[in-house]
Amino acid sequence: MNIEARQPSRSSRTKPAIVDVDIHAKSSVEDLRPFLSNRWGDYLQTYGQRSRHGYAKGFPYPKGQPLASRRDSWPPDGGLPASNLDFMRHQHLDQYGITIGIMNPLSPTGQGDQNVEFGAAMCFAANEFQIEHWNRLEPRLRASVCVPYEDGELSRTEIRRRAGDQRFAHVLFMSRTSELLGKRRYWPIFEAAVEAGLPVGVHVFGYSGWAMTNSGWPSFYIEEMTEHSTSCQAMVTSLIMEGVFERWPELKIVLIEAGFAWLPALGWRLDNAWKKLKNEVPHLKKAPSEYIRQHFWVSTQPMEEPDDPEHVIDVMNWIGMDHILFASDYPHWDFDDPFLALPPKLTAEQRGMIYSGNAQALYGFA
Amino acid sequence: MTINLHAIDCDVHPTVPGMKALLPYLDDYWRDSVEERGIGSLESISYPPNSPLTARDEWRGTGGLAGTDVTQLSETVFGRFGSSLAICNCLYGVQLVFAEDMARAFTRALNDWIVKEWLDKDARLRASIVVPLQNIEYAVDEIERCASDRRFVQVLVLAMEEAPLGRRSNWPVYAAAERHGLPLGVHAGSAYRHPVTSLGWPSYYIEDYAAQAQGFQSQLTSLIAEGVFAKFPSLKVVLMESGVTWLPGFLWRFSKFWRGLRTEVPWVDRPPDEIVRDHVRLTVQPFDVPEDSEAAERAIEHLRSDDILLFASDYPHWQFDGDEAMPKAIPRALYRKILVDNPLATYPRLKEAVR
């Protein structure tokens, strides 16, 4: 949360190798302009980004602090949190010995924009920016393929453009899509991701355009945050029930910043209902929880913290220790400190898997 | 009357066979409207009539419906399951009606039908007051109208309504419920003002049913974040047909965010998990646990409370086979609390039957 940056407290000898699958390297709108055509640059200037919510600037639910960022993450020389590579190295990458960090740009990227043509141009620009401004200077930082996911074909084009480029770690979605993720409109994206050998990362946020709960709009940011897990439950359910994993058995989904303690209970619920309603979804070849176990990975932040830490270890075992990836969410307010976030009772081997081994296996990082 | 108490079934469902059954309980205007406009049925897609979950096959009668007959319900719930009291939660789709006056008329008829066709016919039955949240004044009026009948033990709303339940506009309903010693029962189901997921409409019924659990999570978040339990310290909320085991993970997440964001909701002056332990109860059918009994035992341990579970068969929904309505995973040591003590502590009016 709002902790001050500390001096490195561990020698490099005791620092574990850490792959951080959620770093929010930031660009401004101006940063993307060089990568936009005149057409879309002018459009951006005149009409701006239009998400599926009402505000031209800012967020429907005001954050707890500016840009939802740690107070200490604003670079001393100015600029936005996580926009300055040197300061990011100092405060995060070197501080914790991050060996590889995956950048998940949230905004501006054009993802979820009402205008998908514009969204496609913005995604292209955001992807170029990640390479030119970040990865080229700091190869530890890997890029996400931002896609205009509300249009399957435009997304496929962007994925094919990046296919085979090892600097890109995964295809990136925001979790609040305008329809459930298993629906056919998104299938070209899964097909292209599998073709390119890329996992699909789904990071929480975005705006679906639908009410944020199935009982209407909540009042508070704390509800918006809590509700990420409910929308992800619906998303996981949809991917399974639509038969997406029967169609693309190699498809791998990484749930980022969604928490994870809800996942086993969802599997039990789906299994129970499926036993009685099997004939509605005859295309499923096994119990829903088996698809979860096989096709989903979760990232740790925001790490659930029950009073009894054994309970979260139960949950991790139910998900599978080999499907849990470390994430810090730097520079956001609910950042998990890599040295402190994991439950102390995990074995050294389990910590190694979560810090780096699982991510290396999933993403094929050397 | 004194009842020798074995078990209290906190969730059974009488089924309205059709609008015809409600005609005697409507005034002339609404009776004419129903007939002239051809309003035949208010059954909700939350429970498609022929879906396997909606009723166990052996309980389906004429027309394929189950739970239409008080004798059959009583024989099953009191005879085969061995309960001595049962709470009727009627799920007829009055909450889906858009016109407020129609909603009021149909809801009143429904509650009167429950009294005449069910409560008056078996002294072991209790019921929930169905309320038209379409108009809060009407909802409060309905509580006031029905509450003097002590066989009404709860106020009933759905897991998905037009607005999150905690919203301040709903508070007069909670004031009335608290005043009369009635818990707020939240049952699976939707008024279908919104898609059943925050990402739109799913393709399959199984997704709709699964999404009920997300509805409960959202409603708990709303009730707590808006400060309902700070304002109404005696109010109890009962979540019915919720699946139960989503609760611990949900609370860990919500409580963590509360620690970081509590300045946004300063009236929430203690962690959500504590509030839930004091105010919220859950019925045990269905009980979404893994088949592996050791994992199931751990999942129950994660609830960290012997007080929050209430026995329910969910008759006539198909949640289990045979006559053993208590989920297998629940340890014997908890039976007494779940069957009797917890329901009595939750529903003050039930005690009146067992004095």
Image (cartoon, helix red, strand yellow):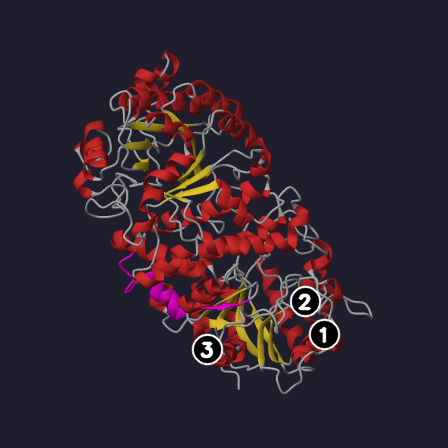
Residue A218 showing in the rendered view? no
Discs 3, 2 touching: Cβ within 8 Å: no
Q: What is the magenta range?
A: A281-300
The x, y position of residue B34, in whole percent, is 34, 21
Task: Tell me the CA gap for discs 3 and 2.
Answer: 29 Å
Q: Is residue A71 left or right of residue A15?
A: right
Are dots 1 and 2 in contact, CB under 8 Å?
Answer: yes
Q: Position of residue B97 (x, y in %)?
A: 42, 29
Q: Amino acid at mark 2?
A: Pro
Element under disc 1 = helix
Residue ID for mark 2: A331
- Residue A60 in the magenta stretch? The answer is no
Tell me the residue at 22%/31% (across/down).
Answer: B74
Query: What residue is pinned by disc 3?
Result: A197
Residue with the most extreme front position: B355
In the rendered structure, which amino acid carries the disc numbered 1? Gln
Is residue B40 in view from this perspective?
yes
Q: Amino acid at mark 3?
A: Gly
Of all chains, the one bearing label 3 is A
Is A213 placed above or below B175 here? below
